[in-house]
Amino acid sequence: MQASVHEAKTNLSKLLEAVERGERVVITKYGKPAAELIPARKSKVKFGVMAKELGGHVPDAFLAPMTEEELREWEGE
């Protein structure tokens, strides 16, 4: 399925439904393919995987801002 930029802006919800059904959607600009809508990948990141090791509590220091020295080390300086 193809849609111009204008059609895509007007019918985005319908195009997303088409992608969810497995259709390939190409957005064209001046009649030439410019982009393709594809299904989002499922995240491989799992939040809370270390909760057990931390005793179910995130230490306050974990969320504290880095010192200038830590920031330089982080940036590889």
Image (spheres, rainbow, N blue to C red):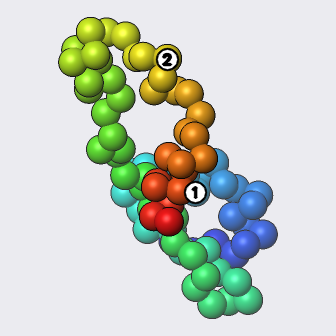
Is residue 71 rendered to the left or right of residue 22? right
Query: Above or below — where is 41 with respect to 59?
Result: below
Query: Above or below — where is 10 with respect to 48?
Result: below
Name which residue type carries label 1.
Leu
Residue 71: % across, % down: 54, 50
Q: At x 60% / y 47%, what residue is drawn?
A: 68
* Residue highlighted by disc 2: 60
Mark closer to the observer (2, 1): 2
User: CB of mark 2 within 8 Å of CB of mark 1?
Assistant: no
Residue 6: % across, % down: 78, 69
Residue 63: % across, % down: 52, 27
Nearer-the-camera pick, 10 or 40: 40
| Residue 8 in view in this figure | yes
Nearer-the-camera pick, 49 or 6: 49
Assign a secondary structure to mark 2.
helix
Residue 64: % across, % down: 56, 27
Q: Quadrant of residue 7?
A: bottom right
Assign a secondary structure to mark 1.
helix
Name which residue type carries label 2.
Asp
* Residue highlighted by disc 1: 15
Q: At x 46% / y 55%, what residue is drawn?
A: 73
Is residue 10 rendered to the left or right of residue 34? right
* Crowd band around label 2 with a 10 angstrom C-alpha radius: few (<14), some (14–19), many (20+): few
Query: Above or below — where is 71 with respect to 47?
Result: below
Nearer-the-camera pick, 42 or 60: 60
Is residue 23 rendered to the left or right of residue 70? left
| Residue 19 in view in this figure | no
Nearer-the-camera pick, 18 or 48: 48
| Outermost residue, front side | 69
What numbered label is drawn on residue 27? none
* Crowd band around label 1 with a 10 angstrom C-alpha radius: few (<14), some (14–19), many (20+): many
